[in-house]
Image (tube, helix red, strand yellow):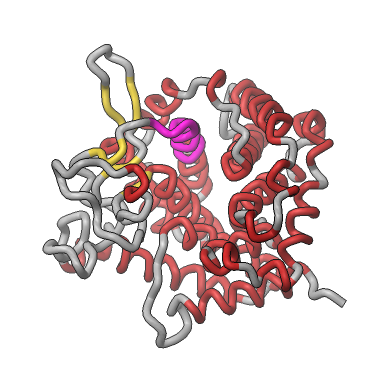
Amino acid sequence: MPPSRTAAAVELMTRFADRTGLVSGRPSVRYLWTDAFAVGSFLGLAAATGDGRYLELACRLVDRVHHVLGRHRGDDGRTGWLSGLDGDAAEVHPTRGGLRIGKPLPERAAGAPVDERGEWDRDGQYFHYLTKWMTALDHVARATRQAVFNRWARELADVAHRAFTHVLPSGERRMYWKCSIDLSRPQVASMGRHDPLDGLVTCRELEATTAALDAPPEPPLDAAAADFGAMVDPRRLATTDALALGGLLVDAYRITTLVAQGRWDGGEALAAAVLDAAQVGLHGWGGRDLHLPVDARLAFRELGLAIGLAGLERMPPAAARPLAPYAALRGEIEAFWLRPGHRETRTWHDHRDINDVMLATSLVPEGFLGTG
């Protein structure tokens, strides 16, 4: 008999925690995207099992990420926190300088020619990774009822907004896709298709948590939310990339949740636009990745879609109805990757940490999606 969803997630996250040094003496291997989903997975396990150790692991992982990715690399001539703060001030404000991606190679030096292929392996800061970490912190704040995690997320949102947004000579507002570790310059100047949407939704969610915890709204995020909102173009949201489609569905879920809570007046129109874009994209995608040989499939991209579909299941029926034909894909994707033989391929092992964590997140999605 196959293990339950929760038991499978426990096994995946236990191995991840040991392998990456979270609960063992092994070297601490931190990667911001993976760790953001891992925090959500631990929160999901805490909710599913009632076992407080998973909440403790989520908090421990937050601390490890801040002390590794909030500081300069060991092979960098610079030392200390990215914020430039020292001592107690740095510990109180660990996200004020942003957070590194955790890529294996040092960032591209200022003035060095761009190598588009090589840039994928170079460190720096990605806006869409930072928003994932903001959400992870915010959901820890809700789970623990400790506003400090929300404040760290707000400080990260503030510095990311200031570093990644800029004005073209034409006067148009745009965003960089990737910045240097110290946020002083762009590394990739093009704008991610969904970065403004992610920024807007994340700011709105942070504001809602701040209010729910009756915490000071510091630093203020009104200007950042307005700026991100002005850059959202509903006509450009559609995509046929499975991972990005999952992100759209997660954003739609969060918007509809905030609307239902009375936290986003007028959010219905944006939610409808995001769901329309997801429907167009899913139709264009057509499940093509699922027909490839197992060793040609990238699990974490499919699992990103599965996580988004978990959000779709939790939306009001009227909003989710047009996408109902795609709901069964979540179970199909999970069942495929739960088969042990499918996790013995080179493509699984090449991305083992992110694959394990995102499969666990899909199995226990409550912590990543947020429930309150």
Q: How far from the left and from the top, in percent, is residue 66? A: 34, 64
Query: Residue at the location (49% across, 33% down)?
Result: 194
Rendered location of residue 231, percent (x, y): 42, 23
- Residue 81 lies, with reference to residue 170, above or below; the image says below
Q: Is the magenta stretch mostly helix, strand or loop?
A: helix
Q: Which residue lies furthest to the bottom in this view?
A: 25
Q: Residue at x 74, y 59 (%)?
A: 334
Instruction: Please provide the residue range marked out in magenta.
Output: 191-203
Taking the magenta stretch, the answer to whether it contains residue 193 is yes
Q: Please state which of residues 88 and 287 is positioned toward the viewer in this rendering.
A: 287
On the picture, is 143 further left or further right than 29?
right
Q: Is residue 301 something that shows in the picture?
A: yes
Residue at position x 64%, y 39% in the image: 249
Tally the marks.
Answer: 0
* Quadrant assignment, res 74: bottom left
Say which of 300 and 253 sits in front.
300
